[in-house]
Image: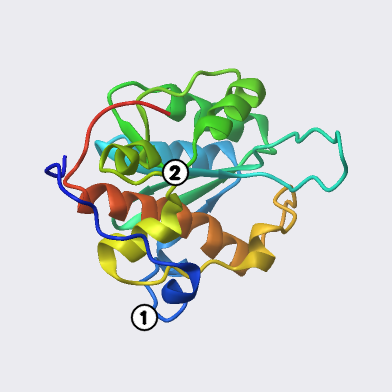
Amino acid sequence: MLAAMQPPPLPAPEEIALLEPFERIGLDRIELVASVSQAEAAAELLLAEPVWGFDTESKPTFQAGEASDGPHTVQLAVLDRAYVFQLHEPGCRAVAGELLARGGIVKAGFGLHDDKRRITHKLGVEPQDVLDLDTVFRSQGYRRQMGVKAAVAVLFNRRLLKSKRAATSNWASRQLTPAQVLYAANDAWAALRVYHALGGVTGSSA
C-alpha cells in the first residue's frame, strides 16, 4: 500500500473539468457478452488474470419506492480488454455469477457495497475477494467517498470521461449503444488502472 503520509488534496469538480482526458479502452478492445458461448470464452481469458476491474450497471429507477431489478450488466476488465456481460440470458448470467463467486481473484472497483447486495439477490452468489478502492483511499486520509473519477484525477492528474446521458440510460435494453458500452467498460477498466497505480493493494472490504 502507499506509505502513510498527507494525501494529495482532492480536486474540486471544476478543477477536474480542466484536466486533460484520461485514456480510455476503445470499442475494439471491449467485448459485449450476451450468450453462454460468449461468456464461457470470456471466462477462459479472465481466469488467467489475478485481478479484474469490476463494476455493474442497473436501469435507473425514477419513482419513490420503485425497486431496481438490476444489475443488468456486470463489467470485468483486465489491462488489455474489458467485458460487458449482459444478464438477460440464463446461461450468460450463470457464468457471470460463477466468475464473481470465484475466490483467489481480486475484483477491484468503487462503491461496491450496493453492487454486491444486488448481485447476491439477482445471481444467487456471494462475490468473493471484492476490493472496494474507496476504503483504500479512506485509509490514506481521504474523508469522503472517492469514486473512480476523483481517483483518476488524484493519481493520474487526468479527467475520466463519464457521460451523464449514458449513466442514466436504460441498461436493461438488449441492444446497448456504443456510448453505453464505452461507459460501462471504462468504469471497470479505470478502476483496474487505479488498483495498479496504488501498487496492487490487497484486501477485501466492500
Amino acid found under the numbered disc labelled 2: Phe
Against 63, is 155 above or below?
below
Q: Is 57 in front, or is 8?
A: 8
Left or right, 85 with respect to 22, comes to right
Contact between labelled residues 2 and 1, with CB atoms less than 8 Å apart: no
Q: Quadrant of the N terminus?
A: top left
* Residue on which disc 2 sits: 110
Left or right, 200 with respect to 22, comes to left
Q: How is the image coloured?
A: rainbow
The reply to whether residue 165 is visible in this rendering is: yes
Amino acid found under the numbered disc labelled 1: Glu
Secondary structure at badge 1 equals loop
Of the numbered discs 1 and 2, the one sitting upstream in the chain is: 1
Q: Which mark is residue 124?
A: none
Q: Quadrant of residue 162?
A: bottom right
Q: Alpha-carbon distance for marks 1 and 2?
A: 22 Å
Against 58, is 30 above or below?
below
* Residue on which disc 1 sits: 20
Secondary structure at badge 2 equals loop
Picture coordinates of residue 58, whole percent (x, y): 67, 44
Picture coordinates of residue 94, whole percent (x, y): 57, 26
